[in-house]
Amino acid sequence: MSGTHSANMVHSELVHIKLVAERLSNADLDESGLPRGYWRKRLRSIMQRHQLTQAQFNEIDRILNMLGE
């Protein structure tokens, strides 16, 4: 995957996950078909599969905090 394509994909993923985390309460996340653990797993996958900037790591940390990690 090219660097630009990978960076765009990471950005899109982080925006999507952040929107979900912001819109749903922790109880809603736990009761949904995609609980907090699912979203944390997606974030960890992004960290393992892509070369991230410090800003992206910081954003992942903020989202993980929203998810209760």
Image (cartoon, helix red, strand yellow):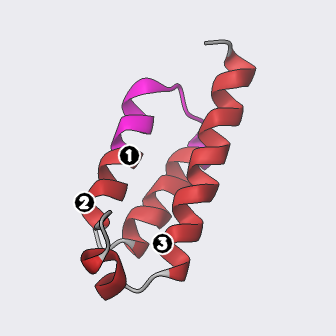
Question: What is the spatial separation of the Cα atoms under label 1 and label 3, in whole angstroms?
Answer: 13 Å
Label 3 to label 2, Cα distance in Å?
A: 12 Å
User: Along the line of sight, which residue is nearer the eye, 59 or 25?
Assistant: 25
The residues colored magenta run 44-55
Q: Position of residue 69 (x, y in %)?
A: 28, 67
> Closer to the camera, 51 or 28?
28
Instruction: Identify the disc placed on residue 37.
Output: 2
Which image quarter: residue 39? bottom left
- Determine which residue is flagged by label 1: 42
Q: What residue did someone put label 3 on?
A: 21
Give the amino acid type for the residue marked by disc 2 in the picture: Gly
Label 3, residues with CA under 10 Å away: few <14, some 14-19, many ≥20: many
Q: Going by the image, does 42 lie left or right of 14? A: left
Does the magenta run of residues contain 46? yes
What percent of the width, then of the height, locates residue 51? 53, 25
Labels in figure, total: 3
Residue at the limit of the structure toward the top, as seen here = 2
Could you tell which of marks 1 and 2 lies nearer the N-terminus?
2
User: For this view, does 63 lie left or right of residue 14?
Assistant: left
Q: Relative to residue 61, is residue 65 depicted above or below?
A: below
Which of disc 3 and disc 1 is earlier in sequence? 3
Element class at badge 2? helix
Q: Residue furthest front?
A: 33
Local SS, label 3:
helix
Residue kind at label 3, given as amino acid type: Ala
